[in-house]
Structure formats: C-alpha cells, structure tokens
Amino acid sequence: MAVIKANSRDVDMLARLMRAEAEGEGDLGMLMVGNVGVNRILANCLDFRGIRTMRQMVFQSPGGFEAVQKPYFYQRARDKERRLARRVVNGERQHPASNALWFFRPAGNCPPQWYNQRNVGRYKAHCFFVPNPQDCPRVY
C-alpha cells in the first residue's frame, strides 16, 4: 500500500531522481535517496512545509536536489529504477535513511550535526540526517 500518492509519472520522476543522486551507490543507495524524498512529502515540517507532491519535492527551490540541475536527471527512467521507486512509494525504508530528511556527501567524515539536524549514519559516500521527532512527527 502506497504511503504517498504517486501516479506513473511521479514514479518515473522519483526513479530518475534516485538514479541521478545515487546510481554509483547501488540499489540500496538509490532506495535511501527515495526514502528521503518520500519523507519530505510526508513531513509537512521545517523546510518541507507545504511539500505535498512528487513534483514539489523534486523541484523544491531553495533546498531541493542538486541532480535536477544536471542533464542526467532528464534521461528516461529505466525499469530497474522504476521498481526501486515503487518500493519506496509503497513504504519500504532503509536505515539510515528511514526517517531522514537530508543527506549530503562530505569530503571527509560525517559531521555529528548538519544545520542542527542529527547525523544517523552513513551509507557509502552519503551522510543522513534526521529532524527532531517533536518537530517532524510524520516521518517517524
């Protein structure tokens, strides 16, 4: 059962985002990027208040995803990425991105906090950060 509303175009958009942000980190890395995206739609808090659709989440500015500024994002989604995107839309979560609203790729170690958000772990090159549960209960 889907945790957010998503039609086939939304799934394609999420699939393209997941690939563009984390293809080099394999299926698990792409699933984690998808988790962050779905969490931003669910959250309705902090930087993501009023983000209710896939399009709003993907193209949020400021605060959106760097990948949408690159041509690779605009290439057609592949079946493999669509399957991964559907898994995330249907509620599959992967630690450390389970409740994360942010991720980034630091030059070195993950900082313990990023803009006052707690680091919950790293997967390959990306560090993941979660909001306080009191601030964003919908992602928990």
Image (cartoon, grey):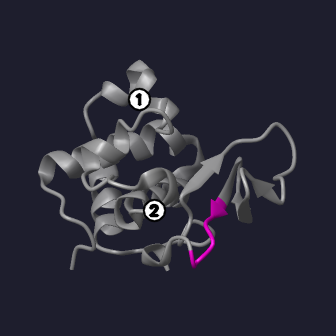
Q: What numbered label is drawn on residue 45? A: 2
- Left/right placement of residue 64 relative to residue 121 reads left
Q: Residues within 10 Å of mark 2 (few under 14, many from 20)?
A: some
**Pointer 1: what residue?**
68
The magenta stretch spans which residues? 129-134
Q: Residue at x 34, y 50 (%)?
A: 81
Q: Is residue 108 in view from this perspective? A: yes
Q: Residue at x 40, y 74 (%)?
A: 92
Q: Is residue 79 in view from this perspective? A: no
Q: Position of residue 34 (x, y in %)?
A: 42, 56
* Residue at disc 1, secondary structure: helix
Does the residue at mark 1 contact the one at mark 2 (Cβ under 8 Å)? no
Q: Position of residue 130 (x, y in %)?
A: 62, 66
Q: Residue at x 70, y 42 (%)?
A: 105
Q: Quadrant of residue 106?
A: top right
Task: Reply above or below: 16 against 124.
Answer: above
Q: Residue at x 47, y 31 (%)?
A: 67
What is the CA distance from the residue labelled 1 to the residue labelled 2? 23 Å
Q: Quadrant of the N terminus?
A: bottom left
Amino acid beneath label 1: Val
Task: Reply above or below: 33 against 131.
Answer: above
Q: Quadrant of residue 127?
A: bottom right
* Residue at disc 2, secondary structure: loop
Q: Position of residue 116 (x, y in %)?
A: 73, 57
**Magenta-highlighted stretch: main secondary structure?**
loop
